[in-house]
Image (spheres, rainbow, N blue to C red):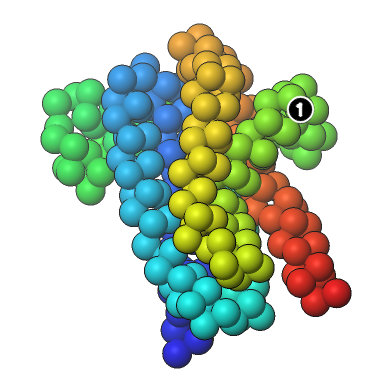
Amino acid sequence: MNAFIIGWVALFFSGYALFDAFAVISRMAASKASMNAFGAAIEKIMNTLKRLSIFSFPPALGYFVMRRDLDALFFAIFVAIVFAALSVSAAIFFRHSLARYFFMVSKSFGGGSGVLRSFIRPDALLVDDRERLSDRGENVPGLVASLRQHLPLLLMATWVYFIFGASIFLINILAIFFVDAAPVILQGLGFFNGLGTLVLAFLIDPKISRFLDNRESLDEITLVILTSQFSSIAIVSPIVFGSLYAVSHY
């Protein structure tokens, strides 16, 4: 039973992380296709799928809370983190291929095709489009320089993505730590998500929108946001939850 529930948590949390990455890549690709409005629509589609994923596994976490099985809860969290980190790593590695696909979807829709047809059978890339999507000249020093240039955005986005992704785990851990106050603690999830939403809406989205409107440094910003997603899952989450696990067994 535990193995099934842990797999359930890992599957949907990694799905959340993957759709979150798709939302970023699709929005940037649509901007390159001069389809900012449709890019916003694709982003909403991906965010909807992301929400469906992230709200599909809290009942599984609640099972461990109900049993007060802290070790199983932590094990499920760490397994989910590993799979989510792998999902985002794959999105980063294949980001140019994904960007080409979403670019073709945007061009197909702009050419009059329906939404479903655009996703299923997007139009082929033209020669000029291939030049616009070319990733020639990309190298590790250049990528590192891009991350350093946008370091404030990277750090801020890392914190926001951690709040969004980890708050469900954190709330359930606290519910086991403080069983008597569990009903109150579990209601705090909305507060953490709301806090992340405020920062996202007032600080991060406006910065990204400026690049989208000007269609400049889109590849760099895509990498920065994807890196922040990866950092929140693969670096910040293990540190935070590893520390909580150590405290719980002190």
Q: Quadrant of the N terminus?
A: bottom left
Residue extending furthest toward the front: 180
Q: Residue at x 36, y 19 (%)?
A: 36
Is the residue 180 above or below the residue 166 in the image? Answer: below
Q: Mark 1 points at which residue?
A: 151
Three-letter amino acid code at disc 1?
Answer: Leu
Q: Is residue 235 visible?
A: yes
Alpha-carbon neighbours of circle 1 within 10 Å: few (<14), some, or many (≥20)?
some
Residue 54 occupies which quadrant of the picture?
bottom left
Residue 245 percent location from the top left of the image: 75, 70
Is the residue 174 above or below the residue 214 in the image? Answer: below
Could you say whether the residue bearing mark 1 is in a helix, strand or loop?
Answer: helix
Q: Residue at x 74, y 56 (%)?
A: 240
Residue 244 percent location from the top left of the image: 75, 64
Q: Which residue is drawn at 52% across and 27% down?
A: 198
Residue extending furthest toward the bottom: 1
Residue 195 percent location from the top left of the image: 55, 34
Q: Residue at x 38, y 41 (%)?
A: 47
Q: Is residue 21 visible?
A: no
> What count of labels does the image hold?
1
